[in-house]
Image (cartoon, rainbow, N blue to C red):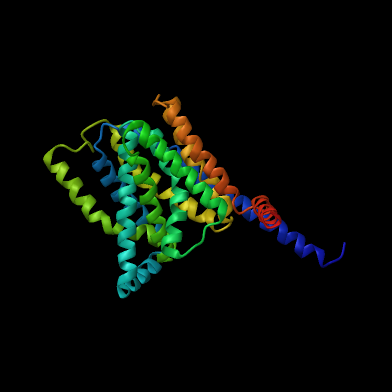
Amino acid sequence: MAPGCRPARRWIMNDKRTQKIGAFYAISAYVMWGLFPLYWKPVEQVPAFEILGHRIFWAFLFMIALLLFSKKISRFFLNFRALFKKPQHLLLVIAAAVLISANWFIYIWAVTNGHVVESSMGYYINPLISILLGILFLKEKLTVWQIVAFILAACGVLIQTIEFGQVPWIALSLAFSFGFYGLTRKLIRMDTISELTFETLFVTPIALYYLIHVQIAGTAAFGNVSLLTTLLLIGTGVVTAVPLLCFAEGAKYISLTMIGFFQYITPTLSLIIGITLYHEPFTGVQLISFSFIWFALIIFSLSGTALMKRISSRRLIETDHH
């Protein structure tokens, strides 16, 4: 073997290894998110606002501990000073904090009130909402197949709206809040640990005020119910931060296409849990509605592949001949 072949082979092996590491982190994040209903259901007797307050407060403490442990606290303070020198970036971080808090609240309320299936629908729709926001705010362009996917998904939502006489607001609220959150994160361009710490920092005073208020009023669940519930409320900080950190780590090593493929693990697991474990209704109309969305996502996932490009070019050739 020629000497020059060895470095290339080693580079390919290393590239495959980093892709495997990235895939492991990304899949871990999406699996954890998909299993979230199993965590929130045992605390369903706790009001959603109180759960949200604990989730924000304990997540903030966890992120501070992580900054100290990873010796990145100095970088955090540098980012903090820089943030206040750029009001636009500060507003974006505050907007991100509000959006992710709203998303967390809606999801917690949905799970603890028996809407796991509809919440899974929201995260199926989310990638398509992200594409729409990219077009509107970042001047990104859709391919023909992505337009087809978006129309099919819209049909799926419309079917449920007509059948049940009301808009699936839980699904749409989750999709839009997380979509706008992703947009703000893209505009901020900050390292994940600092960004997540800022997001929790700006809403922690509100969360802490609410938690102290309910504790003084004697209506708080924390410390007044079972030990398991209290421990689960404390643990909300860890279960909030760890998947986000895994996702950020995975995104460093794998392509956006792989991330786009893996992200459907979350709503699929939630849907299965909602139907099998919590026996939520899944009617024929919902199956048709979800089928439109699933088909849209298949087309969307394949939209950038060589197969779809060949099909599109073949159609253009046939049109020219006619």
| In-image side of 30 versus 208 (left or right) | right
> Based on the displayed image, in which of its 4 quarters is residue 72 positioned?
bottom left
Q: Residue at x 47, y 30 (%)?
A: 287
The picture places residue 163, in percent across and down from the top left corner, at 37, 31
| In-image side of 153 versus 232 (left or right) | right
Which residue sits furthest front?
A: 322
Q: In the image shown, does 242 or 169 lie closer to the viewer?
A: 169
Q: Residue at x 16, y 37 (%)?
A: 219
Quadrant into which the C terminus falls:
bottom right
The picture places residue 274, in percent across and down from the top left corner, at 42, 30
The picture places residue 58, in percent across and down from the top left corner, at 31, 48
Quadrant into which the N terminus falls:
bottom right
Q: In the image shown, does 130 or 228 lie closer to the viewer?
A: 130
Can I make out residue 163 in this image?
A: yes
Relative vertical location of residue 134 with respect to residue 81 in this rendering, above or below: above
Relative vertical location of residue 36 with respect to residue 302 in this rendering, above or below: above
> Based on the displayed image, in which of its 4 quarters is residue 170 positioned?
top left
